[in-house]
Image (tube, helix red, strand yellow):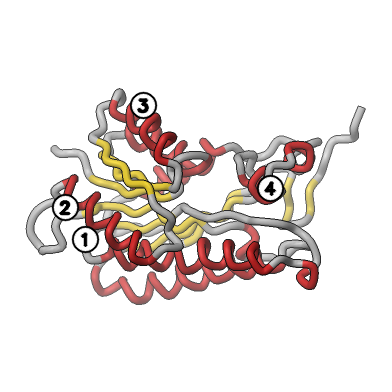
């Protein structure tokens, strides 16, 4: 049996990288994309060593034309056609996203708002639309949401709004694609220690490290294993929505931190 194909966005770090490594080990072939080509090349080598065929494409998902062109190139490399015959795209892990800045909305920067909304909402839409024509009955789409898409928290305003949009779009996509037999799932992590906070605080390592002090956060592997579980379900099963938080987290803004010694 040939390996199925999965496309993973935001694959150069965090959840995307961990998912790529795990799926390569579990028998998938990979189409990987992010903005950072050098990291993609290194990841591709590691996944090829696990037996996967891998093709990479570096572009910014905010760019609609680049996304359409990039997806078309990857599908061509993999021999995936939009026709009803031949190999389909079995899964899309729509993972690219970020938070930039944290504070009252009236102190927010236009460029931060644009970056979050364009990446988390429009980028997700651009990539999903570009991939759907290559998917068939039995294919699956997994959107990376967030606990911020379920609950708001102080200083999260626009980021929370963007992830609430992902929550709504995941529900809408599920309705739009149900008659084509394409399952749509959403994974919503809570506090997870990746590059997320370093990006949010624009390279301020001290501020990023403080986010995870005093408790054991999720790690990228936790989310990768959840995505692999979703993709491994039998065809009649769709995990619609999965919220995953560390044990020390009760809501988007309730954390139990160990006292500082």
Disc number lying in front (3 or 4): 4
The answer to whether 224 appears left or right of 257 in the picture is left
The residue nearer to you, when weighing 171 against 84, is 84
Q: Secondary structure at mark 3?
A: helix
Q: Which residue is mark 2?
A: 80
The answer to whether 4 appears left or right of 258 in the picture is left
Q: CA distance from mark 4 to mark 2?
A: 38 Å
Q: Earlier in the sequence, mark 1 or mark 3?
A: 3
Q: Earlier in the sequence, mark 3 or mark 4?
A: 3
Q: Which residue is mark 1?
A: 134
Residue 235 % position (x, y): 27, 55
Disc number lying in front (4 or 2): 4
Disc 4 packing (10 Å; few <14; some 14–19; many ≥20): some
Q: Secondary structure at mark 4?
A: loop
Any mark on residue 202, and which?
A: 4
Q: Secondary structure at mark 1?
A: loop
Query: In percent of the image, x 15 and y 39: which residue is there?
Result: 2
**1 and 2 marks in contact (CB < 8 Å):** yes
Q: Earlier in the sequence, mark 4 or mark 2?
A: 2
Residue 81 % position (x, y): 14, 57
Q: Which residue is mark 3?
A: 46
Rendered position, 179 above or below 194: below
The residue nearer to you, when weighing 42 against 229, is 42
Q: Earlier in the sequence, mark 1 or mark 2?
A: 2
Disc number lying in front (1 or 4): 4
Q: Secondary structure at mark 2?
A: loop
């Amino acid at each position: 049996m040939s390996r199925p194909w999965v496309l993973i966005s935001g694959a150069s770090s965090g959840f995307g990288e961990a998912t790529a490594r795990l799926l390569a080990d579990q028998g998938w072939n990979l189409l990987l994309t992010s903005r950072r080509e050098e990291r993609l090349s290194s990841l591709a080598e590691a996944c090829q060593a696990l037996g996967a065929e891998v093709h990479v494409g570096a572009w910014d998902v905010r760019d609609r034309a680049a996304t359409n062109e990039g997806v078309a190139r990857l599908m061509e490399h993999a021999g995936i056609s939009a026709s009803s015959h031949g190999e389909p795209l079995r899964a899309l892990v729509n993972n690219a996203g970020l938070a930039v800045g944290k504070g009252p909305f009236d102190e927010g920067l236009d460029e931060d708002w644009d970056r979050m909304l364009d990446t988390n909402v429009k980028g997700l839409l651009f990539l999903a639309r570009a991939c759907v024509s290559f998917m068939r009955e039995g294919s699956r789409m997994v959107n990376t949401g967030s606990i911020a898409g379920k609950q708001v928290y102080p200083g999260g305003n626009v980021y929370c709004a963007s992830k609430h949009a992902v929550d709504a779009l995941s529900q809408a996509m599920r309705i739009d694609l149900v008659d084509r037999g394409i399952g749509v799932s959403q994974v919503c992590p809570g506090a997870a220690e990746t590059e997320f906070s370093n990006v949010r605080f624009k390279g301020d390592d001290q501020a990023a490290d403080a986010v995870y002090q005093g408790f054991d956060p999720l790690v990228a592997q936790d989310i990768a294993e959840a995505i692999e579980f979703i993709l491994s379900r039998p065809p009649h099963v769709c995990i619609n929505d999965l919220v995953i938080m560390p044990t020390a987290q009760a809501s988007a803004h309730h954390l139990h931190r160990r006292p500082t010694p």
